């Protein structure tokens, strides 16, 4: 997640777009995109964990042990949660908010109205995506769940890689 913290939007836009995307707004978009990237990577990791588990017959053939049913169930629930969270963020937060923004923009008659509609859209997205004021605990919980998916993938990858096991024993 440290890499994600380093990711940010750094656009240089000319007037009049610079009115809609000043540096403070780009910071907010960066936060939203970082969260989307984190959830996407967690979902990818859950899928990769399944690939590793699916090769577990090769582990057994090489003298390893089979994957416990509880780990299979855990991976399945993690995948389902991350897929649901990703859908929520993309569809229920961003796409729905953007549709509302488009509807609102259709009736706006001033530049101030355009700017206000955009700010309201972004604020609404941030709040619903656990990035608003007062949502720090929820965001930490989401980040913690993503981290657990990464740990499961790493553990499964290490268990399926004899070279990683040999390296762990020597440490």
Image (cartoon, grey):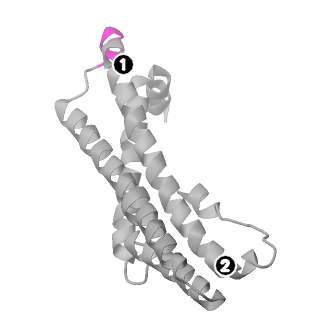
9 sits to left or right of 148: right
Residue visible at 34% across and 71% down in the picture: 138
| Secondary structure under the numbered disc 2 in the rendered image | helix
Kindly identify the residue that appears in the image at 49 percent across and 73 percent down.
101
| Distance between mark 1 and mark 2 Cα atoms | 50 Å
Quarter of the figure with residue 30: bottom right
The quadrant where residue 56 appears: top left
**Label 2 neighbourhood size at 10 Å, few (<14), some (14-19), many (20+)?**
some
Residue drawn 20% across the image and 37% down it: 73
* Depth order, front residue of 143/64: 143
Residue named by callout 1: 55
Depth order, front residue of 116/46: 116
Of residues 72 and 44, the one nearer the viewer is 44
Which structural element holds mark 1?
Answer: loop
**Residue 82 place in picture, x, y as percent:** 35, 49
Left or right of 14 in this view: 127: left
Q: Is residue 2 depicted above or below 45 in this figure? A: below
Specify whether 169 is left or right of 34.
left
Q: Please give the range of residues in magenta.
A: 59-64
Nearest the eye: 140 or 22: 22
Earlier-in-chain disc, 1 versus 2: 2
Give the numbered dot on residue 20: 2
């Amino acid at each position: 997640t440290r890499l994600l913290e380093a990711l940010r939007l750094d656009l240089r836009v000319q007037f009049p777009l610079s009115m809609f995307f000043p540096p403070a707004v780009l910071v907010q978009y960066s936060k939203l995109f970082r969260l989307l990237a984190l959830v996407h990577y967690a979902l990818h990791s859950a899928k990769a964990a399944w690939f590793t588990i699916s090769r577990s017959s090769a582990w057994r053939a090489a003298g390893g042990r089979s994957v416990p049913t509880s780990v299979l169930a855990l991976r399945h629930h993690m995948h389902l949660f991350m897929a649901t969270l990703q859908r929520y963020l993309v569809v229920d937060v961003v796409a729905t908010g953007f549709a509302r923004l488009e509807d609102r923009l259709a009736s706006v008659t001033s530049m101030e109205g355009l700017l206000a509609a955009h700010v309201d859209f972004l604020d609404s997205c941030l709040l619903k995506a656990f990035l608003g004021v007062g949502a720090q605990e929820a965001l930490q919980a989401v980040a913690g769940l993503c981290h657990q998916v990464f740990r499961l993938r790493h553990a499964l990858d290490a268990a399926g890689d004899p070279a990683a096991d040999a390296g762990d024993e020597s440490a």
